[in-house]
Image (tube, rainbow, N blue to C red):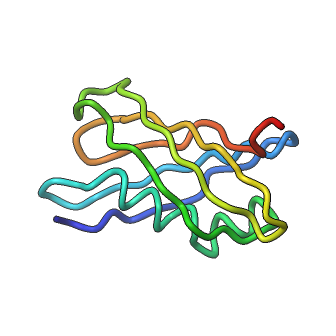
């Protein structure tokens, strides 16, 4: 499996984190790559919190538009949900993220 390279694009006021990850050639494990990225310093700076216990589903396929989700625990103990979308066979984008309702 190839590792994906990641960059943060921006953060909305409501706490939504938007980012993209680009991989080199070869298959990308979207779930594992997204888990590492959510727990990275880049996301910490944008979300103004640290995350642990990130878990992500795998997209059904590598077709552009396929969605997958992640959850992680913030430093204050709250659960955050993240929605991801496949851009192509090697790239994904985290399109929204924030504290889980409840």
Q: Is residue 27 left or right of residue 66?
A: left
| Nearer-the-camera pick, 24 or 100 | 100
Specify the farthest residue to the top.
Answer: 65
Q: Quarter of the image for the C terminus: give it.
A: top right
- Position of residue 99 relative to residue 59, above or below, is below
Q: At 61% across and 70% down in the image, what residue appears?
A: 52
| Relative image position of residue 14 (x, y in whole percent) | 85, 39
Count every numbered label the image shows and give the total: 0
Say which of 25 and 73 sits in front.
Answer: 73
Q: Is residue 72 above or below residue 57?
A: below
Quarter of the rendering containing residue 92 = top left
Does residue 49 appear to the left or right of 35 in the view shown? right
Indicate the position of residue 26 as horizontal and vertical percent values. Answer: 12, 57
Residue at 23% in and 34% down: 62
User: Residue 56 location in percent, x, y?
Assistant: 44, 50
Give whichever of 5, 49 is nearer the camera: 49
Furthest residue toward front? 102
Quadrant for the N terminus in the image = bottom left
Above or below, 68 against 74 in this view is above
Q: What's the residue at 23%, 55% (across, down)?
A: 28
Give left or right: position of 37 versus 73: left
Q: Position of residue 41 (x, y in %)?
A: 63, 75
Q: Is residue 19 left or right of residue 65?
A: right
Residue at the spot 20% in from the left edge and 66% down from the top edge: 2
């Amino acid at each position: 499996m190839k590792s994906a390279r990641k960059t943060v694009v921006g953060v909305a006021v409501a706490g939504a984190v938007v980012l993209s990850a680009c991989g080199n050639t070869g298959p990308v494990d979207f779930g594992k790559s997204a888990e590492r990225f959510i727990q990275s310093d880049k996301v910490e700076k944008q979300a103004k919190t640290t995350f642990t216990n990130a878990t992500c589903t795998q997209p059904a396929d590598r077709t552009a538009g396929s969605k997958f989700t992640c959850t992680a625990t913030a430093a204050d103990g709250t659960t955050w949900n993240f929605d991801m979308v496949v851009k192509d066979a090697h790239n994904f984008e985290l399109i929204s993220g924030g504290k889980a309702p409840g």
